[in-house]
Amino acid sequence: MSADLLVVTTVNRVRTLRMNNPRRLNGWTLAMQRAIGEALEAAARDDDVGAVILTGTGRYYSAGADLSGSFRLGHPRALRAMIVSGNYELFDQYIRFPKPILVAVNGTALGAAVTTSVLCDAIIAAEDATFSTPFARLGVPPEGCSTILFPRLFGAATAERIVGEEGFQPTANEALEIGLAQWVVPNEALLDRAQEIAEGWIAEGRTRTYRGDVTRAELEAANARESEAVADAFLSKRFLMNQYRFLKSKKKTGPAMTFYALAVTRPLWGRLL
């Protein structure tokens, strides 16, 4: 686990994991995902940790999954299997985490950074926080168990606004109104208030909970279904070209060309899926 990517501190049995790559908007590269996963596993094993806070550094909580280093040319069935397992594991590490976990959203949260947050016990947001799940615009289906959690927590109409073509991006106060966030505080008070909440959970003996009265089995089943759908979408020409254009605009020529090569040869290798 890289200390450069994740800053880990423990105070009064509260373990805080602070994503620390603001230059890349705390995006979930493979290295960042690995660092968070290792830190969660360590917190789960540590009897001196009673609750966890997850937060970010800078103006972004996290820009979500960074796919620029995730795709490798290879047999299509192997690539699809890698996407399915990678997507499933990303969310399963939150589902199976055995202790209360509070997400302190310090700024912009995108995509999987939002859906993983809803898998945790609660969300506290800074006043400048915003939430966005641009699945429809990217040409991918909802993930992170949002197909069952969002309608149950926010109602069908609001859930569709968030994940559908409208692309509703709630501010912190709007997130509080619809039940996405449970607290909104001034930016400078975020971590102090999060610490206070987490210590209170420990004092009252709180155990791990899932929002919306869902069971772990329901979440695992939804995660499995969604991971299959995500893999199919990620291997579609529309998505591959979207990634090519995005990475090219960021002057990431090498990764961009990987997606371009996959897109233009899709009619050929698609027969092997």
Image (cartoon, helix red, strand yellow):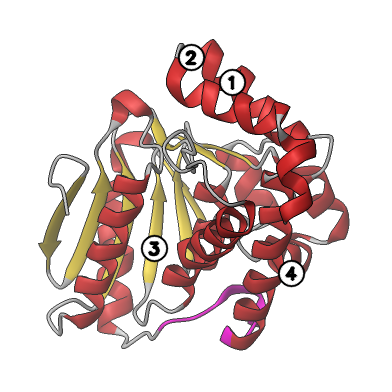
Q: Quadrant of the C terminus?
A: bottom right
Residue 121 sits above or below residue 240 on the image: below
Q: Quadrant of the N terminus?
A: bottom left
In the rendering, which numbered label is found on residue 250? 2
Q: Is label 2 in a helix, a strand or a loop? A: loop
Reading the chain from its start, which is encountered first: label 3 or label 4? Answer: 3
The residue beneath circle 4 is 148
User: Is there CB contact under 8 Å for labels 1 and 3?
Assistant: no
Looking at the image, the residue that sits furthest to the right is 157
Reading the chain from its start, which is encountered first: label 4 or label 2? Answer: 4
Is residue 41 inside the magenta stretch?
Answer: no
What amino acid is labelled 3 in the image?
Leu
User: Is there CB contact under 8 Å for labels 1 and 2?
Assistant: yes
Q: Which residues fall within the magenta stretch?
A: 208-216
Nearer to me, 255 or 117: 255
Distance, label 1 to label 4, CA atoms, is 29 Å
Q: Is label 4 in a helix, a strand or a loop? A: helix
The residue beneath circle 1 is 246
Residue 246 sits above or below residue 36 on the image: above
Distance, label 3 to label 4, CA atoms, is 20 Å
The residue beneath circle 3 is 102
Nearer to me, 142 or 98: 142
- Report the side of 215 relative to 268 (left or right): left
Which quadrant holds residue 26? top left
